[in-house]
Image (cartoon, grey):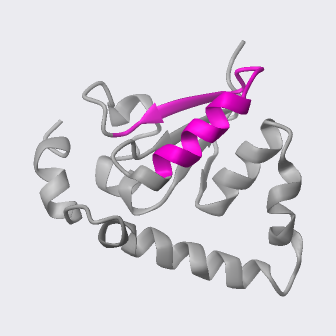
């Protein structure tokens, strides 16, 4: 069975890892392939040429048909696949969606600082040479 979603995540981010582990436990039908972009085996050529810096800048998912989705759309679809789609229902509310998306963009931009990690340039030293 081909996965309905390939979920690219930052395994070095404690909050990202917690979210991913939560989803993994609930993905009893194995509809989602979870790929740690920090793994030495991560090769952008296998994942629609999404580079390490690009993947680090925002959450990325690759749909079964090859379409790339980003940010909250990845989480919303993942939760839908594991039977918890209602969690992201607020994204469907016209006045809330822009606020939630703005908050997520802020998180994505500053998550390395928020979680006390090195900046992308330092992290990229080893990862970007692949």
Looking at this view, is 47 or 95 the one in front? 95
Query: In x, y percent, where is residue 11?
Result: 39, 42
Looking at this view, is 50 or 8 the one in front? 8
Left or right: 62 in relation to 73: left
Q: Magenta span has 124?
A: no
Please determine whether, in this image, residue 52 is positioned above or below residue 65: below
Q: Picture quarter containing residue 7? A: top right
Query: In x, y percent, where is residue 62?
Result: 59, 40
Residue at 58% of width from left, 47% of height from top? 19
Query: In x, y percent, where is residue 91?
Result: 80, 70
Left or right: 48 in relation to 121: right
Residue at 72% of width from left, 28% of height from top? 27
Q: Picture quarter containing residue 2? A: top right
Looking at this view, is 51 or 10 the one in front? 10
User: Which quadrant does the N terminus fall into?
Assistant: top right
User: Which quadrant does the C terminus fall into?
Assistant: top left
Q: Magenta span has 31?
A: yes
Residue extending furthest top?
A: 1
Residue at 36% of width from left, 72% of height from top? 114
Residue at 64% of width from left, 44% of height from top? 67
Query: In x, y percent, where is residue 38?
Result: 31, 39
Left or right: 38 in relation to 29: left
What residue range appears in magenta?
A: 16-37
Left or right: 92 in relation to 75: right
Task: Count the labels in the image.
Answer: 0
């Amino acid at each position: 069975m081909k996965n309905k979603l390939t979920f690219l995540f930052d395994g070095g981010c404690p909050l990202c890892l917690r979210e991913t582990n939560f989803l993994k436990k609930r993905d009893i039908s194995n509809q989602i392939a979870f790929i740690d972009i920090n793994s030495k085996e991560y090769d952008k050529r296998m994942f629609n040429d999404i580079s390490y810096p690009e993947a680090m800048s925002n959450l990325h998912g690759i749909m079964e048909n090859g379409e790339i989705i980003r940010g909250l759309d990845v989480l919303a679809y993942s939760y839908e696949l594991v039977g918890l789609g209602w969690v992201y229902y607020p994204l469907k509310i016209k006045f809330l969606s822009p606020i939630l998306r703005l908050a997520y963009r802020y998180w994505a931009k500053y998550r390395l600082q928020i979680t006390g990690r090195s900046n992308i340039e330092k992290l990229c030293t080893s990862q970007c040479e692949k």
